[in-house]
Amino acid sequence: MDAFTRMKTNFLDLIEENQLEAVPIQVRVHDLTPEEAIGNPEDRDYPLVKGRERLLEAEILGSRGQAFTDTPGNFSGTLKSVALLKLTDNRSRAVFIASLNALMRHLGLVEKTIHCKDTSPPLCALDLVKHIQENFGSSRVAMIGFQPRMAQALAKTFALRVMDMDQDNIGQTKFGVLIEGPDQTQKNIAWCDLALVTGSTVTNGTIDELLSSKPTLFFGVTIAGPAVLLGLNRYCPCGS
């Protein structure tokens, strides 16, 4: 059973177990402006600031959940209509994941479903170095999904390889590290001690390819609910 089938099954189970199926709850999903999503950080090289990605935010009974996507848009419907979405494109997967995060936040099953802002991303990156050293002791890290502050901090301590899907990044050297394309992912996973993976892989449909036997740490708000349901390691200390 692939990751999305498991999550859809769990989503339906959560609705039924909490007797929410017949309740006319409206799930409202909208995409946030860069300022709403990340505030005004000093550095301007984040994908959110550059407009390469957007955050979708879902609200369910006052609880909010977010998910990164490259195809933003609005949605309004019932919990059941979200559960029955065909997860065949990035936008529908983002709507589903943002809603899943909001639902699980409402039920008290997950925390930190809202992206950090302003001065928090650099602090998150510095803490990541300590987190990896204390929990994985890794010397070779393969980052899947370029996050500039994390890459900047990691490159000072670990042997680092970085892969990204953004054509503007591929082939560029950032912080002394060549950004490679997704075609190098499996080679670099074989090389690394730890795969550090963006939670956006759950909305772009590549997560199943990255559930390997290598130690793996997913980062960010997008993967909040999926990490709990799929039993994945997650790092997101500064979210709210």
Image: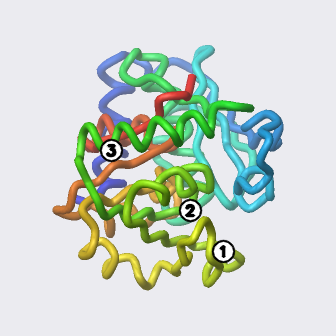
Q: Is residue 26 above or below residue 142?
A: above
- Circle 1/circle 2 CB separation < 8 Å: yes
Instruction: Say which element carries label 1.
Output: loop
Query: Badge 1 local density, few (<14 within 10 Å), some, or many (20+)?
Result: some
| Residue under the point 23% across and 46% down | 136
Which label's residue is closer to the chain start, 2 or 3? 3
Which label's residue is closer to the chain start, 1 or 3? 3
Q: CA distance from mark 2 to mark 3?
A: 17 Å
Query: Badge 2 local density, few (<14 within 10 Å), some, or many (20+)?
Result: many
In the figure, is residue 34 to the left or right of 101? right
Residue position for label 2: 146
| Residue under the point 36% across and 40% down | 234
Residue position for label 1: 169
Q: Position of residue 36 (x, y in %)?
A: 79, 33
In the figure, is residue 61 to the left or right of 117? left
Instruction: Quarter of the image for the C terminus: give it.
Output: top right
Instruction: Say which element carries label 2.
Output: loop
Residue position for label 3: 132
Disc 3 marks a residue whose amino acid type is Ile
What is the residue that sits farthest to the front in this orientation? 156
